[in-house]
Image: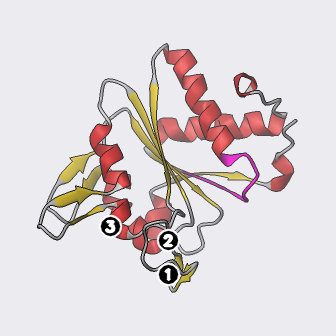
Amino acid sequence: MTSMGLKPTPNMIRKAMQLDARMKIRHGTCVLGDPGTGRRSIVEAVAKANEKLSGGNVNRWFIDADDNTNNPDKSPLHEYGHRGMSLAEFFGEFNSEGTWVDGCLTAAFRQCNNEEHNLIVVKGQANAIFMEPMNTVLDDNKMLCLDNGDRLPMGTNTRLIYIFETCVVMSPASVSRLGFVLINPEDVDFK
């Protein structure tokens, strides 16, 4: 964290260590906490520490699922939770010519390889509609199943991290497949 210009407290170092431990046993981890609690900084600090320890590179993809720039339904709330990216923007869709166009998550998945370490970070509001299709990725199958019939395996060196405020709308199936790190406001004291 110091290489990022931060002077972390012992609590923040402990949270980074918890995240690193979860990432070693789970290929899907969720960092929960309020905005401004250093969630993304902790994820980045763990990625940088792993680069130093391994002497290699950690490829990173950051997906802001709250971004509704291209979503025709820009209402801030939907019956299933926050309305940011559409499912098509996230996973992909067939265009008007019948050709498959990858969404941002699918594009990141295709770029991950088994030689280097890969980290896909998805920030947004926990949303059951987005999370349910991820269950096959988060379970032992480690497979992203797309509407076009493609089945993309998750590489052995790839980790998926969600950055959410809460997980109250997630199904028990999704919750049981993730490791969790909770960051409380009292844990934060960046200088």
Is label 3 or label 2 in front? 3
Residues under numbered marks 3 and 2 in contact, where contact means CB atoms less than 8 Å apart: no
- Amino acid type indicated by mark 3: Ala
- Between the residue at mark 1 and the residue at mark 3, the CA separation in whole angstroms equals 16 Å
**Magenta residue check for 154:** no
**Magenta residue check for 33:** yes
- Amino acid type indicated by mark 1: Tyr
**Visible residue check, residue 145:** no
Is label 1 or label 3 in front? 3
**Pointer 3 local density, CA inside 10 Å: few below 14, some 14–19, many at least 20:** some
- Amino acid type indicated by mark 2: Asn
Counting residues from the start of the chain, the first of labels 3 and 2 encountered is 3
Residues under numbered marks 1 and 2 in contact, where contact means CB atoms less than 8 Å apart: yes
As helix, strand or loop, the secondary structure at mark 2 comes to: loop
Looking at the picture, how far across and down is residue 7, in whole percent? Answer: 83, 29
Q: Residue 88 carries which label?
A: 3
- Residue range highlighted in magenta: 30-39
Q: Which mark is residue 127?
A: 2
- Between the residue at mark 3 and the residue at mark 2, the CA separation in whole angstroms equals 15 Å
Please name the residue shown 36% across and 63% down the image: 89
Quarter of the figure with the C terminus: top right
Looking at the picture, how far across and down is residue 171, in whole percent? Answer: 47, 72
As helix, strand or loop, the secondary structure at mark 1 comes to: loop
As helix, strand or loop, the secondary structure at mark 3 comes to: helix
Please name the residue shown 72% across and 57% down the image: 35
Q: In which quarter of the image is residue 166?
A: bottom right
Residues under numbered marks 1 and 3 in contact, where contact means CB atoms less than 8 Å apart: no
Looking at the picture, how far across and down is residue 29, in whole percent? Answer: 52, 49
Q: Quadrant of residue 77?
A: bottom right
Residue that numbered label 1 is attached to: 80
- Between the residue at mark 1 and the residue at mark 2, the CA separation in whole angstroms equals 6 Å
Looking at the picture, how far across and down is residue 19, in whole percent? Answer: 61, 40
